[in-house]
Image: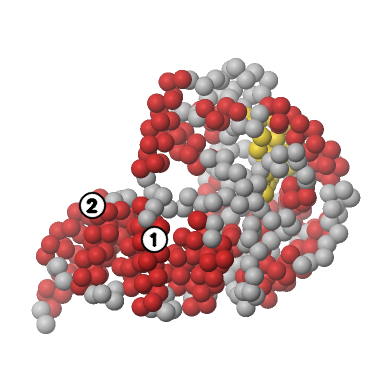
């Protein structure tokens, strides 16, 4: 054995992996390319090189080196799995499924393979297959955080059948079967919120080992994609406001306490709106954005927003009574910070669309068209009533309330599950 050669190889691999962890992918690729020229029989090195190419969005290059890893070892599970990811990015559905499946055939308990196959079906709206594979991922690795979070997100709009042996699906079913008389047509007392959360948290404790959930927003979707990822990409890259966003209005509700936010959840869950408008309620975690507890209802025009305002306001007034603000605004707060006056609905001509921005939007659309096809999810309508994900987010809200010294959380909860995610987000916001 050449100990010196082995140590040199280890040192070079350590350099590459450290650069990879630091997200210095370009430098990592240079070193990795040089290393595999010298070491052409080690599948791990090709797989590492492929992962670097994946992160640089060089999908075809990644596939080539994953295939070289398989030339060295035809049973190399990780190479099949990672090649499936590359094909998912390219939008080659058949090849993606083929490679994820091959990884699972070789290693029956390969949780990553099941999760990636599930995520692929999830994107396509094939929820039965997605659930089956998320469940398998968690069967073989109950601590698989991505599979757990993916499954929790999915059951917000899909009711799985025949999987009650899975603790997440079991907990979700029990939460949805809780009998509650909480109604936006009556008064919602703190006691009723306390009783509801106590029952839900008991279910969580009995079923869910890892209560970490990295989300702070509860959505009620209608199946329509507003394209916000695309619009923010254009804004962040070129500092322009997309044309679509000039017709995007919101009814915004700002609150003072976490108990009010819980009540707003029930308003948003139960409220019937003419166009089934998308809505969300959340705690504010963005740095430099004022406010704490908020709700938004998305509208397609100023007229639509005014109508939704008139429908929603009486429920907010009845259940909140005081210490709230409800108003109509346009677009996103970030846009107004760069273009002051954009959100002012009293003077919509203050900030108007610049036709010179069309070229920038076309560049973004071309970039999206030529970019990754992975994660382009089919949008489905949220199921009514509280689900497991909602309860986990509510616990994150209670963490937030405690951290900002909102003592009202004590009126609706005896105990809260510590959220490291919320702790660090609030700390970062307050720096």
Instruction: Tell me the quadrant of the picture where the N terminus can be found.
Output: bottom left
Q: Indicate whether 395 appears above or below 109.
A: above
Q: Indicate whether 19 appears above or below 246.
A: below
Residue drawn at x 45%, y 65% as measured from the top left: 117
In the image shown, does 4 or 381 lie closer to the viewer?
381
Q: Using residue 214 as the reference point, say whether residue 35 is left or right of it.
A: left
Q: Indicate whether 252 appears above or below 247.
A: below
Residue drawn at x 54%, y 51% as measured from the top left: 378
Say which residue label 1 marks: 94
In the image shown, does 380 or 421 lie closer to the viewer?
380
Q: Is residue 120 something that shows in the picture?
A: yes
- Circle 2 or circle 1, nearest the eye: 1
Q: Position of residue 295 (x, y in %)?
A: 69, 43
Q: Please tell me whether mark 2 sits on a helix, a strand or a loop.
A: helix
Q: Position of residue 93 (x, y in %)?
A: 40, 58
The answer to whether marks 2 and 1 mark residues whose Cβ atoms lie closer than 8 Å is no
Q: Position of residue 407 (x, y in %)?
A: 75, 53
Q: Position of residue 273 (x, y in %)?
A: 75, 41
Q: Residue 27 got which mark?
A: 2
In the image shown, does 153 or 340 lie closer to the viewer?
153
Q: Is residue 421 something that shows in the picture?
A: no
Residue drawn at x 83%, y 62% as measured from the top left: 180
Whole-angstrom CA distance, mark 2 to mark 1, is 33 Å
Q: Quadrant of residue 226?
A: top right
Q: Please tell me whether mark 1 sits on a helix, a strand or a loop.
A: helix
Q: Using residue 173 as the reference point, say whether residue 23 is left or right of it.
A: left
């Amino acid at each position: 054995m050449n100990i010196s050669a082995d140590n040199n190889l280890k040192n070079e691999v350590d350099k590459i992996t450290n650069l990879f962890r630091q997200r210095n992918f370009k430098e990592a690729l240079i070193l990795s390319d040089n290393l595999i020229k010298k070491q052409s029989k080690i599948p791990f090195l090709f797989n590492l090189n492929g992962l670097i190419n994946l992160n640089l969005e060089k999908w075809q290059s990644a596939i080539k080196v994953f295939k070289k890893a398989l030339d060295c070892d035809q049973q190399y599970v990780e190479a099949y799995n990672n090649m499936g990811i590359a094909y998912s990015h390219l939008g080659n559905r058949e090849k993606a499924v083929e490679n994820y499946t091959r990884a699972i055939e070789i290693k029956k308990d390969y949780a990553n393979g099941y999760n990636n196959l599930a995520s692929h079906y999830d994107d396509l709206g094939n929820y039965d297959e997605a659930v089956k594979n998320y469940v398998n991922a968690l069967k073989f690795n109950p601590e698989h955080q991505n599979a757990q979070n993916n499954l929790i997100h999915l059951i917000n709009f899909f009711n799985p059948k025949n999987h009650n042996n899975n603790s997440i699906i079991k907990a979700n079913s029990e939460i949805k079967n809780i009998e509650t008389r909480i109604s936006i047509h009556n008064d919602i007392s703190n006691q009723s919120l306390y009783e509801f959360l106590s029952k839900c948290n008991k279910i969580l404790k009995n079923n869910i080992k890892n209560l970490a959930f990295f989300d702070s927003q509860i959505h009620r979707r209608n199946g329509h994609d507003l394209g916000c990822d695309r619009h923010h990409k254009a804004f962040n890259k070129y500092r322009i406001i997309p044309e679509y966003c000039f017709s995007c209005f919101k009814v915004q509700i700002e609150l003072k306490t976490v108990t009010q936010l819980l009540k707003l959840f029930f308003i948003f869950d139960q409220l019937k709106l003419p166009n089934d408008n998308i809505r969300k309620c959340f705690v504010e975690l963005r740095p430099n954005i004022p406010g704490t507890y908020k709700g938004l209802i998305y509208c397609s025009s100023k007229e639509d927003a005014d109508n939704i305002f008139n429908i929603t306001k009486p429920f907010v007034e009845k259940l909140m009574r005081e210490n709230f603000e409800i108003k109509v605004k346009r677009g996103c707060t970030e846009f107004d910070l760069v273009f002051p006056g954009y959100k002012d609905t009293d003077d919509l001509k203050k900030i108007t669309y610049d036709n010179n921005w069309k070229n920038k939007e076309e560049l973004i659309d071309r970039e999206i068209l030529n970019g990754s096809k992975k994660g382009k999810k089919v949008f489905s309508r949220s199921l009514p009533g509280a689900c497991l994900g909602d309860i986990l987010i509510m616990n994150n809200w209670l963490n937030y309330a405690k951290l900002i010294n909102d003592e009202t959380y004590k009126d609706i909860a005896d105990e809260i599950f510590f959220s490291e995610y919320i702790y660090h987000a609030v700390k970062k916001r307050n720096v």
